[in-house]
Image (cartoon, rainbow, N blue to C red):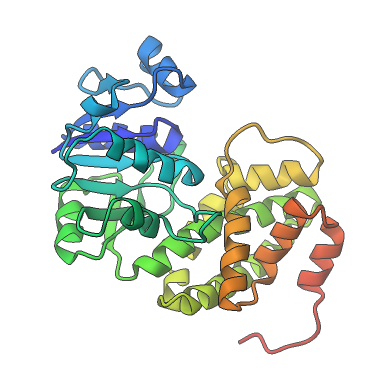
Amino acid sequence: MNITVIGCGRWGSFIGWYLDQIGHKVTFYGPADTPHMQRYLETRTNGMLTLRDSIGLTTDIKEGLQAETVVISVPSQSFRGLLHEILDTGIDISKKTFILCMKGIEIESGKRLSQVFEEVVGDEVSLAVWLGPGHPQEFVKGIPNCMVIDSHSQELKEKLVEQFKGPLIRFYYGSDLIGNEIGAAAKNVIGIAAGVLDGIGRSSLKGALMSRGTREIARLIEACGGNGLSAYGLCHLGDYEATVFSKFSHNRAFGEMYAKGETFPDLAEGYYTAKAIKRLADEKGVELPICEAVYAMLYENASIEEKLAGLFLRSLKQEF
């Protein structure tokens, strides 16, 4: 399969590296003036992995869009702009397959990324999402994990799982696009909350955070028309170890540094997702205490101690 990966950050880089390893013809596309692409053009490494000679590099989006399959891994808030850029090339993409390997919700619209894709491109172009736990730093060392591929098309799911399976990743068929996308995006917000707990020396509360976090995201998924059980699957709860505990988690690290009054230098999707989730929860009338606390800390400069007391010292209630 000829595959172009758009987005050369650490996750997109791993995806391309992995697909090349299992025998696909892979090309990375990125603008020439971006740091990730500049480094690959000069050294073919990002410090974590090195691209084999079989992987192509291009700074021409039209050349990149010649592939039959396009994997996208870019910041969620720039996704709509990228889609318009793709359409502006004039290339016929009607027969191509697009796979979204990123997690987020658009702030301005409150829409899931598959909804943004269908709104801009249309619902007749093949689309799938690739979600689940794991860090590139561990995958490249040979540590395997499980992930999910979901789509409205059962045929497409079966095709991609068969063609993408390998010793590093065991794929499962997703059956709830709504739940998987919301769960995957929301786990980054929970990751920030976990980092805040680390930053103030309250890491022992992570068990409660995971339990209650999963429950509130299940409510949101149900309110949006999905299956609440998806929150307990690989897209959300199954991704907590990599997000809530791992030293490689950008969102956890962001939350810890925020609590310590320090600045985190890299992208933490949960920062943006907290705002998008707040909008979605308000629209659906769903109570999300943890996500709302993270939003208040990040966007309203609310007291961390006050918000934690509000979360874990709330009035008595039934657990379920």
Question: How far from the left and from the top, in percent, is residue 149?
Answer: 29, 57
Task: Residue at 36%, 41% (x, y): give it.
Answer: 84
Quadrant of the rendering where the N terminus is positioned: top left
Q: Is residue 211 shown to the viewer in this render? A: no
Question: How far from the left and from the top, in percent, is residue 311?
Answer: 76, 70
Foreground pick, 81 / 185? 81
Task: Residue at 17%, 34% (x, y): give it.
Answer: 67
64 left or right of 231 in image: left
319 left or right of 101 in image: right
Task: Residue at 61%, 54% (x, y): give it.
Answer: 191
Foreground pick, 309 / 144? 309
255 left or right of 76 in image: right
Residue 121's place in the image compared with 264, above or below, is: below
Foreground pick, 6 / 45? 6
Q: Quadrant of residue 188?
A: bottom right
Residue 197's place in the image compared with 262, above or below, is: below
Question: How far from the left and from the top, in percent, is residue 114?
Answer: 36, 57
Quadrant of the rendering where the C terminus is positioned: bottom right
Question: How far from the left and from the top, in percent, is residue 4?
Answer: 25, 33
Q: Residue furthest bottom?
A: 318
